[in-house]
Image: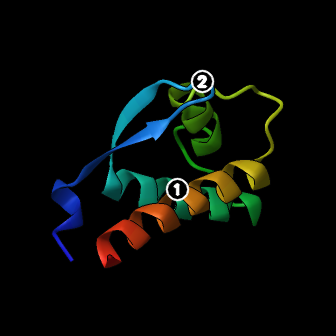
Amino acid sequence: MPNIAKITVNVSDWNDEAVPVPMFQLLQWKAAIKLEILGMSHSRGSVAAHVREVLSAPSTYSNEDLLAYLSSVVADIQQQFAA
């Protein structure tokens, strides 16, 4: 598998526009949102709110739904590298 720190992937936002995001950042977002769901807070505010802003997601989109979306994106990317 290539070095994930150097991989940038295009993630579709809620307006169906491609947003370039480093793969490492996707993994960071996924882990941080998992921790937010468990009750951990971050000193710079909500990671989920930042991800919603970057991906143009509505503010009513729950953290669990956001985590499921990020998990599916990461799984799709992993399948592409496995092939």
* x 50%, y 29%: residue: 54
Residue 17 x/y as whole percent: 48, 24
Give amino acid for label 1: Val
Above/below status of 78 relative to 32? below
On the picture, is 37 further left or further right than 77? right
Q: CA distance from mark 2 to mark 1?
A: 16 Å
Q: Which residue is more in the foreground, 39 or 54?
A: 54
Going from N to C along the chain, the mark reached first, 2 or 1, is 2
The residue lying toward the viewer, choosing from 27 and 47, is 27
State the mark number for residue 58. none
Q: Nearer the viewer, mark 2 or mark 1?
A: 1
Q: Say which residue appears at 83% left-offset and 31% top-offset.
A: 60
**Residue beneath label 1, please?**
73
| Above or below 66: residue 27 | below
Task: Work out which residue is located at the far front of the displayed protein and give it.
Answer: 83
Badge 2 crowding class, 10 Å Cα cut-off, few under 14, some 14 to 19, many 20 or more, is some
Instruction: Give the residue at x 63% y 56%.
Output: 33
Q: Quadrant of the N terminus?
A: bottom left
Residue occupied by mark 2 = 56
